[in-house]
Amino acid sequence: MSDNPENIVLVLGDQLDTEHAAIQAADPARDRIVMIECVEEGSHVASHKHRTVLFLSAMRHFAESKREEGWRVEYTPLDAGRESIVNGLATTFAETPTAALWAVEPGEWRLKDAIERFAAEHSIPLRWFEDSHFLASHERFEQWASKRKQLTMEFFYREERKRLNILMDGDQPLGGEWNYDKDNRKSFPKKGPGALPAIPRFEPDAMTREVIDAVNTVFPDHPGRTDNFSWPVTRAQALSALHQFIDERLIGYGRYQDAMWQSEPFLYHALISSSINLKLLNPREVVAAAVEAHQDNPDTAPLSAVEGFVRQIIGWREFIRGVYWLKMPEYRSRNHFDHQQPLPEWFWTANTEMNCLRQSIGDTLENGYAHHIQRLMIIGNYATLAGLLPQAVCDWYLGIYVDAIEWVELPNTLGMALHGDGGVVGSKPYVASGSYINRMSNYCDNCRFNVKARSGDDACPFNTLYWDFLRRHRAALGKAPRMNMVLKNLDRWEASELDAISERAASLRDQPV
Ligand code: FAD
Ligand code: SF4
């Protein structure tokens, strides 16, 4: 307990959990919840309209639920014109100068820094609460990382499974394997995925419609449209989305996790990232739901699918967060390959001749969502091969996806997709030629480029850029594990072919098609 007469409990847009640590420590008879909508959070990167509507609507619903529980909630709406969170806090503390500030640590270093500076400048006592939403505390991750030269997600994941006793049989993994990749990561048959399970849609209620109007007024030029908004904005909706996934799509999750198909943006994916990142869902209940489904019926929730899903939540998601807080703030400015190309204009329109990118960016602009392999092996792959400036790419990802918050976006984009961190998140770059895309999707069937060709005007740009990338960065890539085999291909080709590839690649980089 603080000696101050009142604590101001700041609740940020991605902290809408029922177990919010600062709210749990506060006293509704004495303390006040403060929530601030501000222009900066929707505009420091060009935020997709779905993303902004989602955050603000979920915040307003959360505020209402807290009022119903008896809390005093001071809520500043977007049209009050607060420039930033700190700007909003300044108004609150000008009226209540003796209060202390309580908050759960934010998901962005930038915001944590701004709040700390604000509190220090105004001599406001600030108490940070660790974010109990996550399974691995900072201390736990730091202790794990301190023993290693290379941070490998797989080893972190195995330790976490043992520590948390998830899908374990004594000290061995349930079923005898740590992963079931041999059963997973398939492409669809030639005729396609067939009838897919419906995905959840949540029609905007009056509160969401008000937010939509505000967003269209304040951010009219931001990407996306609002008439198709249907993301979950309350805990009840998020739980319903989770259970619909577990009941209807988990069965195909592992098997088709990496598959892509024209005009099918959602496939068997969970579509829970925005809910879990806003903390409408807790990772413990998400994992428990999948594990229970397997215990109840392994035919509809096979171990391969459940393990693949659990790995994403307790492995990748926590690992990525650990890397972010371990490496920030210098991490954000890394540029391992010294890539400098600007973002092609079609990142904002999807108007490119490359069908795989037209589909993946088109899905993104339409829904504020693309699934992992579209983000990694289509858009991220292109960005790496074309040498786009990592910080411009990261800003795009941070603004464009409904689930984007810097702690999760940055290591995924800069680290996993762009290898811009020089190998912290992944030991080698996730780059591939058109043949990978052709194997995992039907995009190439509908493309004007020839996926079999490496050079020339009709050659698939992924092929040309891929081989040119390997050639340009050969010295650095040669040190990465498992790259030697592929680099040896370059030695077999005529110099004239390599020159033709380089020439065409330079033109593709300067004038993206
Ligand atoms: P599914 O594919 O069904 O996976 C289930 C859940 O696992 C997700 O909801 C998510 O919570 C978790 N998960 C899976 N992979 C990851 C991962 N690599 N890192 C963290 N959590 C993971 N995820 C975000 O939540 N926010 C981001 O801003 C984000 N940016 C990304 C940028 C790039 C370049 C890449 C390659 C990946 C990014 N991811 C991000 C990870 C992943 O693509 C999304 O979590 C996933 O596509 C969300 O859709 P889903 O809920 O249908 O997930
Ligand atoms: Fe993409 Fe190349 Fe296939 Fe066209 S041919 S869809 S550019 S991979």
Image: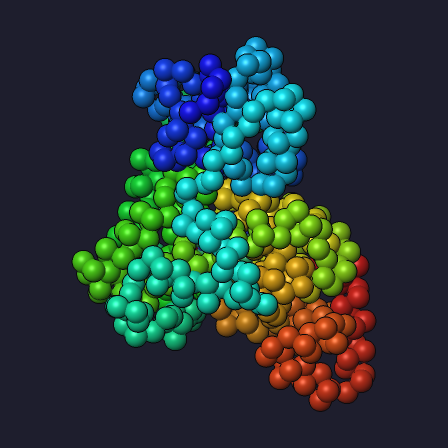
**Residue 315 location, quadrant:** bottom left
Q: Position of residue 375 (x, y in %)?
A: 55, 56
- Relative to 362, say whether 65 is above or below: above
Q: Position of residue 67 (x, y in %)?
A: 36, 19
Camera-nearest residue between 197 and 420: 420
Q: Give the residue drawn at x 63%, y 22%.
A: 123
Q: Give the residue drawn at x 41%, y 43%.
A: 133
Q: Give the residue drawn at x 56%, y 22%.
A: 78
Please, which residue is most extreme toward the front here? 3
Q: Is residue 218 left or right of residue 207?
A: right
**Residue 97 location, quadrant:** top right
Q: Give the residue drawn at x 37%, y 21%.
A: 27
Quadrant assignment for the C terminus: bottom right
Camera-nearest residue between 417 and 127: 127
- Relative to 61, say whether 46 is above or below: below
Q: Position of residue 447 (x, y in %)?
A: 59, 64
Please, which residue is most extreme toward the top here? 95
Camera-nearest residue between 172 and 16: 172
Number of marks in the rendered image: 0
Residue 362 shows in the view: no
Please, which residue is most extreme toward the bottom here? 492
Q: Position of residue 253 (x, y in %)?
A: 36, 60
Residue 240 shows in the view: yes
Q: Is residue 430 left or right of residue 500?
A: left
Camera-nearest residue between 171 and 217: 171
Quadrant assignment for the N terminus: top left
Colour scheme in use: rainbow
